[in-house]
Image (cartoon, grey):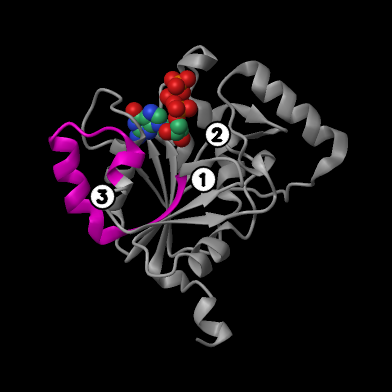
């Protein structure tokens, strides 16, 4: 395999930001629109995808107009009732038109900028490749083959809601990232948001500024 075969082909990949949750631990706020370091969280989630994918989708169940500024298309869950991230992934897979979909959560503002390159290079023959930070798997940071959409639809119809259990039914590769857990930190509470913002302000990493 030559080195160029490891470059992710942009036209084959859709970016999908999952922002369809209820944000209960943040008092019901629409988490993707919560400010982090002066910009909405969705802007940070977008940074490692922008310019690297054929189309950028945001899966959101509230405030579609606000999200539209950060995406090519906003896609709501195909079934109502906040049924969890697997429903968001299925909704994105169904809406995508490329063979692969790169999924990221809206509430992890420090993902590696070369996330796609590394998942692509590390996926091997797997149909699903997820990030592993050396301690934990991050199932919602995933490169997934779009042709699994029908299977996922059937699994959801049969009541499946657990991401790992559905992944385990397919060829699933875990791609190690040596940055450590900080790069995949996700914000569930206002306190976590404040702490991560303070660490960032302390200067441990600069996040590139980007406008919609
Ligand atoms: N489409 C969709 N995405 C969801 C749903 N629930 C969670 N997510 C997404 O999955 C990722 C992880 O979500 P969590 O932090 O576990 O859930 P949350 O709803 O955002 O927050 P909590 O209500 O506090 O659990 C985030 O990117 C969410 O936007 C859902 O019902 N539908």
Residue name at image x 54 percent, y 88 percent = 2
- Between 166 and 46, the one nearer to me in the picture: 166
The residue carrying mark 3 has its beta carbon less than 8 Å from ligand 1: no
Q: CA distance from mark 1 to mark 3?
A: 33 Å
Q: Which mark is residue 112?
A: none
- For mark 1, give the secondary structure: loop
Residue with the mark numbered 3: 169
Q: Which numbered mark, 1 or 3, is in the foreground of this view?
A: 3
- For mark 2, give the secondary structure: loop
Q: How many marks on residues?
A: 3
- Between 14 and 118, the one nearer to me in the picture: 118
Q: CA distance from mark 3 to mark 2?
A: 27 Å
Residue name at image x 53 percent, y 76 percent = 6
| Image vertical order of residue 205 relative to residue 41, above or below | below
Q: Which numbered mark, 3 or 2, is in the foreground of this view?
A: 3
- Residue 83 horizontal/vertical position (percent): 28, 27
Residue with the mark numbered 2: 107
- Residue 31 horizontal/vertical position (percent): 52, 27
Part of the protein shown in magenta: 140-166
Left or right: 9 in relation to 80:
right
Residue with the mark numbered 1: 70
> Residue most toward the right?
202
Q: Badge 3: few (under 14), some or many (20 or more) residues near its Cα, within 10 Å?
A: few
Residue name at image x 52 percent, y 50 percent = 131
| Image vertical order of residue 191 relative to residue 211, above or below | above
Left or right: 120 in relation to 164:
right
- Between 143 and 138, the one nearer to me in the picture: 138
């Amino acid at each position: 395999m030559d080195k160029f075969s490891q470059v992710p082909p942009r036209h084959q990949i859709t970016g999908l930001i999952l922002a369809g949750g209820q944000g209960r631990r943040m008092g019901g706020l629409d988490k993707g629109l919560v400010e982090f370091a002066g910009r909405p969280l969705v802007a940070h989630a977008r940074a490692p995808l922008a310019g690297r994918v054929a189309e950028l989708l945001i899966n959101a169940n509230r405030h579609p107009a606000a999200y539209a500024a950060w995406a090519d298309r906003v896609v709501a869950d195909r079934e109502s009732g906040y049924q969890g991230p697997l429903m968001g992934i299925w909704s994105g897979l169904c809406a995508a038109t490329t063979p692969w979909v790169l999924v990221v959560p809206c509430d992890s503002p420090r993902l590696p900028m070369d996330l796609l390159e590394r998942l692509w290079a590390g996926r091997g023959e797997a149909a699903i490749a997820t990030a592993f930070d050396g301690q934990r798997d991050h199932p919602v940071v995933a490169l997934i083959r779009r042709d699994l959409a029908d299977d996922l639809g059937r699994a959801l119809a049969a009541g499946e809601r657990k991401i790992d259990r559905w992944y385990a039914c397919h060829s699933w590769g875990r791609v190690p990232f040596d940055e450590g857990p900080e790069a995949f930190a996700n914000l569930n509470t206002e306190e976590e948001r404040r702490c991560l913002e303070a660490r960032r302000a302390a200067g441990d990493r600069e996040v590139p500024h980007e406008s919609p």
